Image (cartoon, helix red, strand yellow):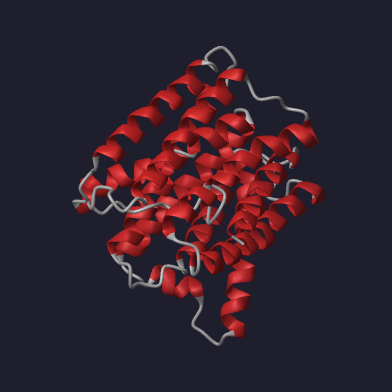
Amino acid sequence: MALGAGLVFSLGALMAREATHADVWQYLIWRSIGIIVVIEAVSRLRRRPTALGRAYGGGRLMWLACLCLLVASLAFVYALKNTTAANAAFLSSVTPLFAIVLGRVFLGERLTRITIAATVVALIGLAVTVLGDLGSGGMVGNIAAVMSALGFAGYTVCVRSDLQRDWSPVLPGYAFALVLLCGIVTLINGRPLLPGPVSTAYALAHGAVIIVVGTLLFNAASRAVPAVAMTIFAQTENVFVPIWIFLFIGERPQRTALVGGAIIFTAIVAKATLDARPEADPAHDFPVEAGPGSIA
């Protein structure tokens, strides 16, 4: 289920690229609507209060978590539309290390030598990926991918600050905010809210099926699979994204993107593996158990 979650999440990137008649704002409107409809339907079936009500009545920390996912989601879809799929996936995969550094700043988590070394190696991989794309005109998309990683990391810190809290309302909470924001921007740009039946269907399926099913698989797996292993399994999403785009759209990743991505993945997997050793530094680092396509 852990590996399957990454596989399911990775399909969302393909849907975003196939929705050729929808820009970022239009796509996110309908993807967010898909999320809200499914989550609220589940809440109603369980006879629980509306998820939106719990999201916006959950206090400032819940609002901050929603804001972080809003930034992460908007930035990731923008990256998919404005740079190569490989760059978007690889650059956003530094989320686990960004989260640990932010945890040090805001939660006082102590950085281990393994974490510091892994962060330095990952930043080298990030630099290789970005520098190899300087002449392609996709630099704004690359920056958006890194912003996406920061947004996911910020959300992780919010969750880490209160482990006993139910954070599930964040999913429809940030989705509703995206509908309002993207709807306003779309109207200001003079574009229709409905981009076309095919692109709308892709966006709805992304939210209602890919995100919901992937999240259910991931949550179920996390109850039985150790956190370190989940950190590694989460990277399968980023591995499959450029594969699907290559197979179905024909977009070939640049060599520098593959090299940089390999460096980043090596840093993340090595950190998770070394932290799992009994003799590892006992300082408590927390893993990130979701990739860019998961709850965003």
Query: Horizontal placement of 258 versus 95: left or right?
Result: right
Residue 245 or residue 182, whichever sits in front? 245
Q: Is residue 114 visible?
A: yes
Residue 161 or residue 276, whichever sits in front? 276
Q: Residue at x 46, y 69 (%)?
A: 169
Q: Quick check: 58 above or below 112?
A: below
Residue 11, percent across and down? 69, 48
Query: Horizontal placement of 149 versus 18: left or right?
Result: left
Residue 228, percent across and down? 42, 54
Q: Residue at x 28, y 45 (%)?
A: 102
Residue 117 or residue 75, whichever sits in front? 117
Query: Horizontal placement of 182 versus 287: left or right?
Result: right
Q: Quick check: 34 above or below 99?
A: below
Q: Quadrant of the N terminus?
A: bottom right
Q: Quick check: 100 above or below 217?
A: above
Residue 224, percent across and down? 50, 68
Q: Residue lying farthest bottom? A: 47
Q: Residue at x 56, y 79 (%)?
A: 43
Q: Residue at x 43, y 48 (%)?
A: 152
Residue 149, percent across and down? 44, 41
